[in-house]
Image: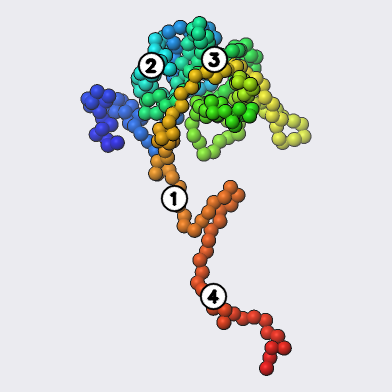
Amino acid sequence: MSRAQLKLGKDGKRAKSKRVQRALENRAPKVNENTKSAMFLKGPKSSEITTGVLRDLAVLKKPNAVMLMKKNQKRPFEDESEINFLSNKNDCSLFMFGSHSKKRPHNLVMGRSFEHQVLDMMELSITRYVPISQFPANTTCPMLGSKPCFIFKGVDFDYKEDCRKFANITLDFFRGCVVEQINLEGLDHVIVCTAIEGTIYWRHYAVLLKRVQGSKMPLVRLEEVGPSIDFKIGRTKFAAKDLMKLACRIPGEKRPKKEKNTTTTPFAKMGTVHKGRQDLGELQTRKMKGLKR
């Protein structure tokens, strides 16, 4: 995108200030993308449970979370236009929509967008919820800028497509910024998802390091800090293979350059060396007395 195009707003008019121009440059496509932001929305009707889940999950997503408390009349599975509009307006590629009705009580819709158009989403029905406020507040978790560990337990995550997609969207939702190196002290919380008989048990733990006398290695313990949620997967909408391939395309600048005559394995990097033809007539061998004339 040229600099002249960056100076144009959504309506085609030129940016009136440097501040607007910097905002347009920040939204422009980049080789190294910005950290994905998520918006949390409420439907035409919502219960205390759905509102509490939205707020607790927004706490885990901070500072890349946008909480929109205004009610939205259009539901994602019925009309995606409002999600696309708010995604473009708030520059968010992730969304979570909470609603409540007699047919679908305590309902969540979690999804992603590509170029501000809904890419894929899935419906989650909340069957049990324990908020963060009901857990002992003896630890500050998570710290700002920290990254979580993820554990997905259960054979359903290996064989069921909807569970695998749930794990993929959850990783994309809460992974935070992409880094090459990380301090182990920054891994201060763990998200554990267990799939058993169609129910996903979502748990959140804090990592506590305690000193042990006579040892330099600390004792690692997990303490549940909430929220604690049980989900059942409902309706799903997955992207087509060609669209998902386009969304996951790696820019040419980030692709590793191919090296000739080399192969890389999980354990080592091996290469092939080409040498000229060897003349066996000039090869010096061991001299034996029996071969002398």
Kind of residue indicated by mark 1: Lys
Considering depth in this image, is 51 or 156 the residue closer to the camera?
Answer: 156
Q: Quadrant of residue 139?
A: top right
CA neighbours of label 3 inside 10 A, class few (<14), some (14 to 19), many (20+): many
**In this rendering, which labeled residue sits more in front, label 2 or label 1?**
2
Considering depth in this image, is 96 or 17 the residue closer to the camera?
Answer: 96
**In this rendering, which labeled residue sits more in front, label 4 or label 3?**
3
Kind of residue indicated by mark 3: Ser
**In this rendering, which labeled residue sits more in front, label 4 or label 1?**
4
Q: Is residue 280 above or below residue 232?
A: below
Kind of residue indicated by mark 4: Gln
Kindly identify which residue carries mark 4: 278
Kind of residue indicated by mark 2: Asp
How far is disc 4 from disc 3 in space, using C-alphas?
Answer: 72 Å
Kindly identify which residue carries mark 2: 79
- The answer to whether the residues at label 4 and label 1 have Cβ atoms under 8 Å apart is no
Q: Residue drawn at (43%, 36%), measured in percent from left and top?
A: 245
How far is disc 2 from disc 3 in space, using C-alphas?
Answer: 19 Å
